Amino acid sequence: MTPALLLAQTADIDAWQAFWQYALIGLTNGALIALVALGYTMVYGIIELINFAHGDVFMLGAFLALTLIGAMGLEQAGAVQLWLGIGLLFVVVPLFCAVLNVTIDRAVYKPLRNAPKLAPLVSAIGVSFVLMNVGLLWHGAADKHFPDLVSRQNLLGENAAIEFSYKDLLVIGMTVPIMIALTGFVKGTRLGKAMRATAQDPVAATLMGINADRVIAVTFAIGGALAGAASVIYGLYINTVGYQMGFTNGLYAFTAAVLGGIGNIPGAVLGGLVIGLARSFGSAYVGERWTSALVFVILIAILIFRPNGLLGARTREKV
Amino acid sequence: MPPLLEISDLRAGYGQIEVLKGISLEVQPGEIVALIGANGAGKTSTLMSISGCLRPRSGSIRLAGQEIHARAPHEIVRLGICHSPEGRKIFPRLTVLENLQMGAFARSDKAGIQQDLDHAFEMFPILKQRTTQAGGTLSGGEQQMLAVARAMMGRPKLLLLDEPSLGLAPLIVLKIFEVVKKLNDEGISILLVEQAARMALKLAHRGYVMETGEITMHGPAANLLADARVQAAYLGG
Amino acid sequence: MNKRQPAPRSLTAQLDRLPQWPLYLGILLLYPLLVYPEKVLFQWTEISVGMQLTYIFIYAILALGLNVVVGYTGILHLGIAAFFGIGAYITGILTVPAYPFGIGFVGSLICASLGAALAGLLLGAPTLRLRGDYVAIVTLGFGEVTRFSLRNLEEITAGMRGLNPIPPPTLPAFLATPLSWLGIQNDWALDYRLFYYLALGLLLVVILLLRNLERSRLGRAWVAIREDELAATCMGINAARVKLSAFALGCGLAGMAGCLYATALTSTAGPDAFDFSRSVIMLCCVILGGLGSLRGTLLGVLLLIGFDNVAAPALDGFLQRANINPDDNPWLTFSNWKLMCFGLALILMMRFRPEGLLPSRQVEAELHSEAQLHREGASI
């Protein structure tokens, strides 16, 4: 957010240049939000649960990354070790978040699968609190600095009008391939199709010989892994983490999922980008301190006026 | 040789309500068996119990002598029971082709699946024209054909069909029943639940009549068709 | 068949056998007058239990409001703290010297209740027709928007500092004299007992109101909607209007509690006092006690707010005095485990006792038959 503010204060910058810079920041942030949003949307698609704890799984992922960076001494490492270390983070943290997410499902949500709909939602809020508490005990109540491992050097040249740094490249370079791979998985593979079938009609899917429990577990694992990858990117990009980051970012991501039509995978990506842009332009043209409120106003407005999201009806309400 | 499907003294229900009050029923290899009865008699619940979606409280279900009533639904499919459920339950946003592929989910023999796919298109040529269309956009009759074809894709020993005639034009019903007959000629045993009792009994070898959770009559289909009580209650006099 | 079994010694049955409300009310009325117990408790805990009880009464009003929405009507409201905050800030604006209104306590109590109820109407009218989980998110989002607005509209709300000082109510003369016979001074800042009785009195009024509503036509309509909205609509219940009435009443009670809270605190507190975790803690109270159950909600408030405001700080103080945690290790500070406790309470209750500790009979019956139904019937 800070570059946006700095730009806003520099009066002699051409308004259009600034506009494109905000757009770029918005898209980068949006891609990050989209990664988290995918976890919400996939889980909702399968078991119609707003997995409130998803944002906190994301938070714990960032905390694990922070601890690992300290343990590996990455801040002092040379270039090769640094990139190996970051590569390792992108393996270990998603794995951790995937296992955590599946464990939560098994332990908390699964016994409530057939309970009234609000019971798992309330449990998810409980899990969110528990995970937040774990984060609080892990890295304390104050926000922490996440080491600035990736260069801020502008890839477009020292004096270019628009800033696009290695950091931005990292975000785009990680999120876009992940989303493409996910789309391929869901569209093309047997398991991906089983996932879509289960989301559309769980009973019929069972009658086809699909093991619904396994599909649900895979969904939680993928959602967790995406949140884990997102948390590492977030840390490296934003450089501040804290135990409450899961709540706020989780809500942004959830808003993105609803915006795109919850349960809809391309919708979550679109929603993430829109929210990213809204926040970036909001902080530039409305005021930084109003951006959060703006996102929630968008959320409420969407729910009231277009509850099925931008990409149309993809939900089913059982009567 | 044991019957292909043997249900004995099966009880099941929802909450306080018992819907199946000790029913016994069997399907011999190669048979079409019709299960007829009024709304709420427990026909669908019987099929759901066989598929493992409704847990029996007591009694047993055997497939070729092997007990299956404690198994999970996805395991039962692998044992060779495929179920075309009431209300068709097509996957609305999967294409017709994907719907059919889901029917073969439990199998991994690619060549065999392709063969069965061709076979399904042969039986229902209309589906071939619709392969890339989303299931939810099909007409009711087409959806029912897709549901039957999808169940066939599991290459079942026993096919459970729940009300394939529901809400369809008579011509389409005839067409579907024709296919059911063909499938049976190919050696698939069929348990057919129907409210259109006359058509079902004409097609079937044997029949069972169900009333409020109990089997009240059974016998060769021709005998049931001729029975005065069945005629009065289910065949419109 | 119908021979009476010996009563099962379940928790509920045992709680049922305890002497009922007159005893509790008696204790609550007498407690502040007997100086000795307050003194002893203060020595143990270094906390004025009487003063904390005042806050417990206030939170009880808030929780009862939430119970109307979540418990009776089955709308998951995740933003009750916002309405609590709206009540507090209306009170602040109408009473602090920085504003010209200065209408005093009674006026601000009425305005805060009505204002919060109006806010509830405005939010509820377009959103209550949405699906249950979406309504939950809308209320949550509204809560956050309210908090950010309170924080950002500094010219009106004084930002993070909050509005103060809020003057205490004026004690009518006909009450001041008899109270002085009981040893209660006419000074709200020095003697906690004035607020204590004020909050207790209002809580009793609210309880009586809700007890009557529970048994009224409207109360039954709320429950009908919770049980089965479609069926209720078919019976001729105007679901939209009935839900809205519950929502507005719940929000209004929250506003009333907010007014009391701000007045007792002499400040609106900062916007963060009305954040999401406050909403969830109130939800915990209602769920722990028993959705839709008056006495359950009261028990839930007593246990959880008591834990939050009295037991946790008391234990922290104890750990500190006993020098168990000289290096300020966060793992050994009791308050650092609060979120965990609330979270686990929610999870365990949903899993093992979704009807709460003191359930309303109806909810209990419903949940149990439903659970059984689902256990056997997968999803047909």
Image (spheres, coloured by chain):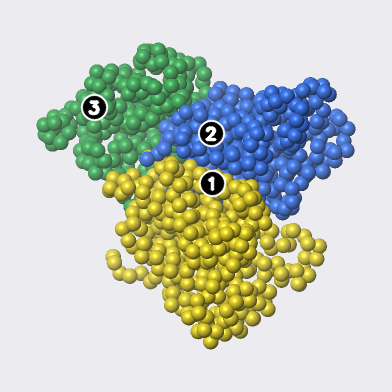
Q: Marks 2 and 3: CB-CB under 8 Å?
A: no
Which residue is at 21% across, 30% downward? B197
- Which one is in front, B91 or B137? B137
Chain for numbered disc 3? B
Q: In which quarter of the image is the C terminus of chain C?
A: top left
- Which one is in front, B136 or B104? B136
Q: Quadrant of residue B97?
A: top left
- Evaluate whether label 2 is on the same chain as label 3: no
Residue at numbered disc 3:
B200
- Residue A168 location (% of width, % of height): 74, 28
Query: Chain B is shown in which shade?
Result: green
Q: Which amino acid does label 3 sit on?
A: Ala
Q: In which quarter of the image is residue B235?
A: top left
- Residue B212 location (% of width, % of height): 24, 44
Q: Residue C142 carries which label?
A: 1
Q: In which quarter of the image is the N terminus of chain C?
A: bottom left
Of tags 1 and 2, the one toward the viewer is: 1
- Which one is in front, A104 or C342? C342
Query: Chain C is shown in which shade?
Result: yellow
- Which one is in front, B8 or A251? A251
| Whether residue C204 is situated above or below residue A317 in the rendered picture | below
Which residue is at 69% across, 41% downward? A61
The Cα–Cα distance between marks 2 and 3, rounded to whole angstroms, is 49 Å
Chain for numbered disc 1? C
Q: Residues within 10 Å of mark 3 (few under 14, many from 20)?
A: many
Query: Chain A is shown in which shade?
Result: blue
- Residue A23 location (% of width, % of height): 67, 27
Of tags 2 and 3, the one toward the viewer is: 2
Residue at numbered disc 2:
A259
Which residue is at 39% across, 53% downward? C245
Q: Quadrant of residue A172?
A: top right
- Evaluate whether label 1 is on the same chain as label 3: no
